[in-house]
């Protein structure tokens, strides 16, 4: 219950912002906030992996892309030519297909978005499982490089394969009807609705992750991060836990990918790129590796600023710079800095209390 | 059948024969000490038994089950707990949380159940918390429950690690130099503690340098030198053993 | 496959392989002295090429290249001094992220200075269609420049590390930093010097390969990944192993074009990286126990 109550301020803030934009006639801001919210879903998952379980991933954009591209491809590739085959008729029987008309008025038969979403997320989970088993045995540089390599492979695949639209990516992705009346789409009229859908997803994500962190499993994860050897000696199955949290973070990324793709109506190869993966790591680092709230806040803030073009053509450079500065001066995130100490120094107060307590 | 049996254990690191044909048995309810000069292979021996290190050859049997080849967490689940020579507490976690990790094998909330905060997991959490506080009280450090574990004084950190190992409710407890860095009073306290642990029914194996502690509380002693066992006997006999004296004091 | 085609592929492989080996050796030099993997290694290669191209209108080719190498070495030194030297006991994760950040900044800086255009140095001898005949196949003379330059660098480095006092001091640092300090070696300077050396060889490689491969602001990342693959393949820290591994990867990559679509060429080397990491992280020529002892 305490967990749910702590989310109330966030819910309040979300509602207030929406109402504000409505009163000041600036609802276009909602679009970028919605997109930022989806990216933040990936980021809080990554934060759990990096900050709590202590495993770095430089390839998480790959999982985002797996989610987005698979759902995009399945919901846009026309199966009408195969209408008479047994497979298609079976799928139709299970209500997996969706019919309609494409922009030229010809008949269109695609996989319906719900089925596509499930397939995409399952695929991401499966790939994370297969990749995770060998990759998580690695440490330090090796782990970083392996995850980086994974991200690059995904990028190369979507760039080279015709099914995924090569350099142009996939567009004309249809809207995603969650339940009748609730639709993920880029329609301007549905801005407010989509804003709440995105934040609803983020809130669910936060609840799940906070529950996880404040549990026996969360404790085990933090113990693995602190000392993998001691954790094992205390009975924690370190490889299984690392794998499970890796898969969980991949699923969060894939879900973000699916929803954002339907919202934007398309996806392109840059979403799988190294720069995106690096950006996500930078944001988690700034927010404080093991601070879920910090990651969420920074995720929304920095993505929003980037999407609004505040960083101009220096976009990637800004995130690179953030990475460096944070790692040099505040490796545990902005909030971990001794702000009070700094303020005390500035105002000329002396620092007396260090002698009492503490070790050595 | 002894609780723990080591037979013909070997560990080679390239050319170094760190543990060379070591065999001994630990009877249930006893306190066994493993001593020897620095570099004798004592901590390596521990690491082989607990699964942290893989053995080159030999056998280790615990409760009639073979241990070699098992992963550390599987061995812990069988009821073997240990402490570390350089205390390995979990940083950025409180003392209580450290001990609660010790309850891991005595609890079962998994990923899914935890994510959904199923009511039974919350009940289990409160039981874990209770039991862990009991361990802290047993060692007299309950006042530090909410302090960050690595900010404590060294002796206190030792106590936390011991509480964490005890939280496992182990059948056997392996202590790696429990008195290292402690003064004469603290060492005596550790001795009393170990006896109380034995009275709780837990078998204890300890690696130690401090002779007063070892002679005081152990039921019998194994002496290692350069990876080989050179003696195994009751404390009085070990004190008089010429080989042992030579190894410690030189010719 | 005809003999001629085979020879073409072989030389293409050797050419690219030599470059990868140099990048890998750059990784190894810094890794050996500091334990850090410098993700910005690829950027040194890029800078060597881009700077010499920019200097070319102002001076003769050899001078432009020499100047580019010197400037890149200074750049490497500055990176180390400003961002790495004063860090005390940084964790591995922190260092990885810092060097990634440096790599990105360098890349983006290059983007703003030179734009997205793809440029290249002119062929040192002749032009793009001139060729010499080797074993029946027509090979560009630039290939010989690349292989020659890389070979000379490897030779120079092995002599340097074995015979000069600075070289020996650097090896001491690599073997045991604390002991080196006790011997009076200024380890801080050794670290800076290792960055300079890595930057220098990277820059020279970048200049020499430019006529064949072209240079643009973003070639760094791909080269870094391949260089890292080669470094791991050859055994991290083992520079002779890097040479062998580099040639191996280059040749594998070159011949893979005959089997796999061109677009997947990069995926080949990454797959090799992943396989090696999973199966034999100490590389083909490294020793398992030695790799296990190295601190991460």
Image (tube, coloured by chain):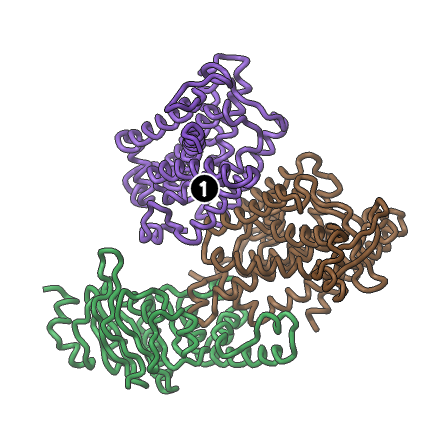
Chain colours: A brown, B green, C purple
- Total labels drawn: 1
Position of residue A235 relative to residue A178, above or below, is below
Residue at x 50%, y 18% (from the top left corner): C129
Position of residue C106 relative to residue C134, above or below, is below
Q: From the top left corner, tell me how far across and down residue C171 is, in percent.
A: 31, 38
Position of residue A49 relative to residue A343, above or below, is below
Evaluate whether residue C165 shows in this view.
yes
Q: From the top left corner, tell me how far across and down residue A9 is, in percent.
A: 75, 62
| Quarter occupied by residue C111 | top right
Evaluate whether residue A322 shows in this view.
no
Residue at x 86%, y 49% (from the top left corner): A188
The residue that disc 1 covers is: C228
| Quarter occupied by residue C199 | top left
> Left or right of C222: which side holds B7?
left
Crowding around mark 1 (Cα neighbors within 10 Å: few <14, some 14 to 19, many 20+) is many
Q: From the top left corner, tell me how far across and down residue C67 is, in percent.
A: 47, 20
Q: From the top left corner, tell me how far across and down residue C230 is, in percent.
A: 42, 41
Quadrant location, the N terminus of chain C: top left
Return the residue nearer the eye: C206 or A118: A118
Return the residue nearer the eye: C151 or A156: A156
**For numbered disc 1, what is the local secondary structure?**
helix
């Amino acid at each position: 219950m305490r967990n749910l109550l702590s989310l109330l301020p966030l819910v309040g803030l979300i509602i207030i912002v929406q109402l504000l934009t409505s009163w000041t006639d600036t609802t276009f801001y909602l679009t970028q906030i919605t997109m930022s919210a989806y990216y933040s879903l990936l980021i809080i998952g990554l934060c759990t992996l990096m900050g709590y379980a202590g495993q770095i991933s430089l390839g998480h954009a790959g999982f985002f892309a797996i989610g987005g591209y698979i759902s995009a491809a399945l919901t846009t590739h026309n199966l009408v030519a195969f209408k008479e085959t047994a497979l298609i008729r079976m799928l139709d029987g299970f209500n997996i297909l969706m019919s309609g008309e494409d922009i030229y008025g010809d008949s269109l038969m695609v996989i319906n978005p719900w089925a596509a979403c499930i397939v995409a997320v399952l695929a991401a989970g499966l790939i994370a499982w297969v990749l995770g088993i060998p990759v998580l045995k690695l440490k330090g540089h090796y782990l970083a490089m392996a995850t980086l390599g994974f991200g690059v492979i995904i990028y190369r695949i979507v760039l080279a394969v015709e099914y995924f639209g090569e350099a142009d990516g996939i567009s004309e992705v249809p809207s995603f009807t969650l339940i009748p009346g609730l639709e993920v789409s880029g329609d301007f009229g549905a801005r407010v609705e989509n804003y709440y859908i995105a934040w609803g997803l983020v809130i669910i994500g936060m609840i799940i992750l906070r529950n996880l962190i404040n549990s026996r499993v969360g404790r085990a994860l933090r113990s693995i991060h602190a000392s993998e050897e001691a954790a094992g000696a205390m009975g924690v199955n370190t490889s299984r836990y690392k794998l499970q949290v890796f898969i969980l973070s991949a699923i969060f990324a894939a879900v973000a990918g699916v929803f954002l793709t339907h919202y934007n109506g398309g996806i392109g190869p840059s979403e799988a790129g190294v720069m995106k993966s690096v950006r996500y790591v930078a944001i988690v680092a700034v927010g404080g590796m093991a601070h879920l709230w910090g990651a969420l806040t920074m995720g929304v803030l920095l993505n929003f600023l980037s999407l609004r073009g505040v960083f101009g053509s220096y976009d990637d450079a800004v995130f690179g710079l953030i990475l460096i500065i944070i790692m040099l001066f505040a490796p545990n995130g902005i909030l971990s800095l001794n702000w009070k100490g700094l303020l005390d120094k500035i105002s000329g107060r002396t620092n007396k209390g260090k002698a009492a307590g503490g070790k050595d | 059948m002894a609780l723990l049996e080591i037979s013909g254990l070997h560990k080679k690191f390239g050319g170094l024969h760190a543990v060379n044909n070591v065999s001994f048995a630990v009877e249930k309810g006893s306190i066994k000490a493993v001593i020897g000069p620095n570099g004798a292979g004592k901590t390596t021996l521990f690491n082989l038994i607990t699964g942290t290190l893989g053995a080159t050859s030999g056998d280790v049997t615990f409760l009639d089950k073979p241990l070699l080849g098992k992963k550390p967490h599987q061995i812990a689940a069988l009821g073997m707990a240990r402490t570390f020579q350089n205390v390995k507490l979990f940083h950025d976690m409180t003392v209580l949380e450290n001990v609660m990790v010790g309850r891991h094998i005595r609890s079962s909330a998994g990923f899914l159940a935890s994510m959904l905060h199923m009511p039974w997991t919350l009940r289990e959490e409160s039981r874990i918390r209770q039991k862990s506080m009991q361990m802290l009280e047993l060692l007299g450090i309950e006042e530090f429950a909410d302090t960050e574990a690595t900010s404590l004084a060294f002796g206190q950190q030792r106590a936390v690690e011991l509480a964490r190992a005890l939280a496992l409710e182990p059948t056997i407890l392996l202590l790696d130099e429990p008195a290292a860095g402690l003064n004469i009073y603290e060492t005596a306290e550790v001795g009393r503690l170990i006896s109380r642990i034995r009275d709780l029914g837990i078998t204890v194996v300890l690696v130690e340098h401090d002779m007063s502690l070892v002679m005081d509380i152990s039921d019998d002693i194994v002496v290692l030198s350069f990876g080989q066992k050179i003696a195994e006997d009751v404390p009085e006999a070990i004190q008089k053993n010429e080989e042992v004296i030579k190894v410690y004091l030189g010719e | 496959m005809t003999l001629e085609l085979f020879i073409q592929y072989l030389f293409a492989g050797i050419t690219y392989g030599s470059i990868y080996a140099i990048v890998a050796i750059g990784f190894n030099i810094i890794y050996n002295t500091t334990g850090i993997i410098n993700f910005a290694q690829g950027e040194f290669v890029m800078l060597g090429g881009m700077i010499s191209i920019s200097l070319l209108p102002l001076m003769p080719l050899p001078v432009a290249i020499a100047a580019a190498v010197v400037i890149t070495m200074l750049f490497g030194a500055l990176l180390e001094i400003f961002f790495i030297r004063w860090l005390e006991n940084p964790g591995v994760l922190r260092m990885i992220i810092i060097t990634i950040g440096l790599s990105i900044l360098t890349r983006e800086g290059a983007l703003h200075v030179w734009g997205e255009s793809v440029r290249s140095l002119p062929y040192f001898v002749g032009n793009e269609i001139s060729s010499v005949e080797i074993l029946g196949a027509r090979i560009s003379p630039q290939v010989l420049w690349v292989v020659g330059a890389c070979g000379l660098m490897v030779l120079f480095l092995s002599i340097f590390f074995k015979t000069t006092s600075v070289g020996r001091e650097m090896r001491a640092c690599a073997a045991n930093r604390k002991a080196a300090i006790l011997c009076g070696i200024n380890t801080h300077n050794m670290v800076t010097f290792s960055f300079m050396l890595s930057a220098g060889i990277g820059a020279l490689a970048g200049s020499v390969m430019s006529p064949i491969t072209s240079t643009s602001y973003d070639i760094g990342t791909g080269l870094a990944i391949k260089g890292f693959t080669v470094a791991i393949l050859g055994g991290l820290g083992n520079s002779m192993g890097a040479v062998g591994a580099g040639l191996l990867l280059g040749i594998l990559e070159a011949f893979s074009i005959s089997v796999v679509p061109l677009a997947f060429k990069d995926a080949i080397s990454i797959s090799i990286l992943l396989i090696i990491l999973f199966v034999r992280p100490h590389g083909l020529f490294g020793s398992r126990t030695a790799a296990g002892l190295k601190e991460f």
